[in-house]
Image (cartoon, rainbow, N blue to C red):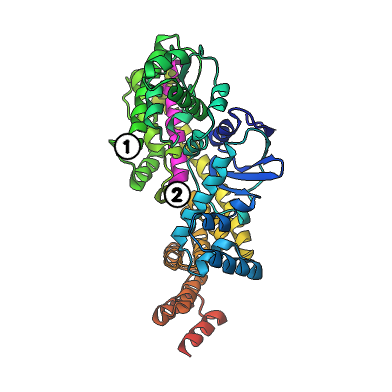
Amino acid sequence: MISPSGDIKDFTIPWLFQDLRKEKETGTIVFSREREIKKVFFKNGDILFASSNLDEDRLGEFLMRTGKITIDQFDKTSESVIKHGKKLGAVLFEMGILTAQDLVAQVKLQVKEIVINIFSWRDGSYQFDGRPLPVSEIIPIQMSTGDLIIEGIRNLDWNRVRKSLPSIKTILRTSTDPSPLFQSVHLDQDQQAVFSIIDGSKSIQEICVLSGIGDFNTLKAVYTLLALRIVETGEIKTREEKIESAVVRETVTTEKKNDAQAVAPATSVTKETIQNAFDGLGRQNHYEVLEVGHGATPLEIKKAYFHLANLYHPDRHFEPEMHDMKEKLEALFSRIHDAYETLSSKTAHHQYNIDLASGVEKEREEEKVQKGKSANRETARAQYHEGMKQFNQRNFWGAEEAFAWAIRLDPGNPEYIFRRGLTLARIPRRGHEAEEHFVKAIEKAPEKSEYHLELGNFYARSGLKEKALAAYRNALQHDPNSDTINKAIQKING
C-alpha cells in the first residue's frame, strides 16, 4: 500500500515510483525541500510529465542551456507568451523555431532531467495527491519508470549506495512479484552478470566474489537491482522455488541482454499481433491463452507465462506507435496473468478443469468480457466529458488526449472519433489526422449531417473548394432544410 506522504530516505523514491507503477495509480507526487518543489505526474502507473519551480528547470532555460534556441529567440518567444497567454512550446512551434517532433523530444528530455535530479536528494519530503491530473498543466509523455530509475541512481555517490545496502551476509533472491521483472528497463553488462548469479542461496558477499567485476561494481549493480525490485532479500529453500528462480533468471537475463544489444526477440510484437491476441481473448480458455496443453507441467506453465509476459506486458511497450495499444496490452496481460494464477495452483487448476468440462467456465468468461466492455464504456464516457471540457477551454492538446483515450476504450463510438477530428483540426500540422477522423466518423454514422458539415468546413478552410462542396451536398441530403449548410454552400459559390 502506498504511503500518501513521508520523508525521503534510502530507497524511498525508486520504490515509491515502483509502487505507483504496480498499483497503476493516477495522481501527482509533490517532492519538496527548502524552497525547491518538483512534481511528477502519473497516469495508470506511467510517468506522464514532471515540473519544477526552479527557473533553470523551465523549458526556455533548458532549451537555451542545451543550445536548441538562442537568447534572442528566448526573449522574443517570452514576450509572446506574456502578451498572448500561450505556453512557450506552442509559441516556439507557431514561430517555426521548433517542429512538433523536435518540441516533443525536447520536452521529454526536460522532464527526464527534472525526474533524474530528484534521485540525488538526500533529504526532503513527498506527498502523493490522487486527485485528477491538471490536464492543462501537462504535456503527456509516457516514459519507462525502470530506465528512469537506472539513470537517476547512476551518479549517486558511493557512500550513499553503501550505507543503503543491507548487510553483506544478506541472501538475495529474484523477486517473488513478477511485475518488476517485465518492466521496460535496460540492464548493463554488470547488472546482467550480477542478476544471473542471484539464486536465493548466495549472500551479497558471495556474489561479490563470484561476479568477477570487483566489489565496487557488484555492489552498485546490487543496489540498482534492489531499487528496481527485480531482486529482494530472502532465501530459497524448496526444490520448486529453485526451479522457478532458474526459469526467472534465464528468461529475464535473455530478454534484458536482447534489449541492451537491440536484438529483436524470436517472436516480434506488432500492433497486428497485439490486436489479434486481444480479439481472441473472448474465445480462449486458460490453456489456449497460455498456449499449453491440458497436461502441461507446472514448469511448462511457468515458462509459457514468462514467454507471453515478455511479449505483452504493458511496461515493455513505450514505443510511440504502441501508444494506442495500451488498453489492449493491459487487458492481454491481465488475462495471461489470470490464466497463470489459476493453472499454477493445484486446487484452482483442479476446479477449473471441472468448470471447463461442465461449461460453467465459458459462461464466466463471457460474463467477464461483457462486464469489461461495460466498464470501458463508462470510463470512455468520462474521458469524453473531460475532452469536451478541455475543448471548450481551448486546451486542444489536453482535449485531444482525452478523446484519444475515449476512442481506445470504446473504438466504435463515432461521436468520440468526430470530436477528436474537430480537436485535431485546431492543432497545427494535424490536419491530415483530422480529415481521417472526420471520414471515419462519417463511415460509422453517415446519417449525421453535422459530421459532413464539419468535414466540408475543414476542406473550405484548407482551400479545397470542390471537396468542401461535395461534403456540404452530402450533409444536405441528410438535412435538406438546414440554413447553416445552405449558407456554407452559398459562401463557397460566392
448 falls in the magenta region: no
Q: Quadrant of residue 197?
A: top left
Label of residue 261 in the image = 1
Spot occupied by residue 379 in the image (x, y as percentages of width and height): 57, 48
Figure check: 210 above or below 388: above
For the stretch drawn in magenta, the main secondary structure is helix
Q: Nearer the viewer, residue 167 or 265?
A: 167
Q: Give the residue at x 61% y 36%.
A: 121
Q: Give the residue at x 32% y 37%.
A: 261
Q: Which residue is mark 2?
A: 323
Q: Are marks 2 and 1 in contact (CB under 8 Å)?
A: no
Figure check: 236 above or below 306: above
Spot occupied by residue 392 in the image (x, y as percentages of width and height): 63, 65
Mark 2 or 1, nearer chain start: 1
* Secondary structure type for disc 1: loop
Q: Nearer the viewer, residue 87 or 398?
A: 87
Which region of the structure is painted magenta? 324-348
What amino acid is found at the position of numbered circle 2 in the picture? His
Figure check: 2 above or below 427: above
Residue 287 relative to residue 393: left or right: left
What amino acid is found at the position of numbered circle 1 in the picture? Gln
Spot occupied by residue 7 in the image (x, y as percentages of width and height): 68, 31
* Secondary structure type for disc 2: helix
Residue 26 relative to residue 356: left or right: right
340 falls in the magenta region: yes
Distance between mark 2 and mark 1 Cα atoms = 24 Å
Residue 403 relative to residue 389: left or right: left
Spot occupied by residue 96 in the image (x, y as percentages of width and height): 48, 69
Closer to the observer: label 2 or label 1? 1
* Quarter containing the N terminus: top right
Figure check: 21 above or below 441: above
